[in-house]
Image: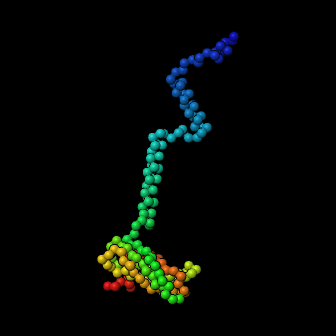
Amino acid sequence: MTDSSSRAGAAPEPATQAEIAEAERRRASRRAERYGGAGRTEPRRRRAIAAGLGVLVVAAGVGVGFLGYQKFGPTDVEAEQLGYVVVDDSTLDLRIKVTRDDPAQPVVCIVRVMSRDGEETGRREVLVTPSVHGTVEVATVIRSSERPASGSVYACSTTVPGYLRAD
């Protein structure tokens, strides 16, 4: 056996702390050259980024929920169609039920007439005057430019235009 073959199987010589540190620096340098950057992000920084993103996602969810509630949540005024009668070729009699949170507040409802093909052929604003009851029934007559096929409530609001006010 030669001296070199006996060394191959033997344990390496113990290295000093300085040699070990230098070898680690070389490995880190090669790793940085190969994969880019100085290494991985610190665990503390990763946790901070994850927490920040989590807070951002929760805030966005709360914002979307709030906007949805404002748009589709309960309203101050709700209206329901009770029925309609076609009086003649240009007139429809419509009955609606209006429910409001504050019965002392006047409300305006827009009602409409549709022809057989679904086109709106007549429209009217109806003033619902203050009352002592939260829910009231209102009947109105709507003129139509064609033979009426149906009638419905388009919308109601607590913002009453000046020309409809009874005061």
On the image, which quarter does residue 138 sit in? bottom left
Q: Is residue 17 above or below residue 34?
A: above
Q: Looking at the image, which residue is at 61% across and 37% down?
A: 34
Q: Looking at the image, which residue is at 46% across and 79% down?
A: 83
Q: How is the image coloured?
A: rainbow
What count of labels does the image hold? 0
User: Is any part of residue 112 visible from this angle?
Assistant: no
Residue 17 image position (x, y, % from top left): 50, 23
> Which part of the image, by quadrant, shows the C terminus?
bottom left
121 or 60: nearer the viewer: 121
Q: Looking at the image, which residue is at 46% across and 43% down?
A: 47
Q: Is residue 82 above or below residue 41?
A: below
Residue 86 image position (x, y, % from top left): 50, 85
Horizontal side of residue 145 vs 104, given as left or right? right
Looking at this rendering, what residue extends furthest in the right direction?
A: 1
Residue 40 image position (x, y, % from top left): 53, 39
User: Is any part of residue 27 visible from this angle?
Assistant: yes
Looking at this rendering, what residue extends furthest in the top direction?
A: 1
68 or 46: nearer the viewer: 68
Residue 79 image position (x, y, % from top left): 42, 74
> Which part of the image, by quadrant, shows the N terminus?
top right
On the image, which quarter does residue 129 sit in? bottom left
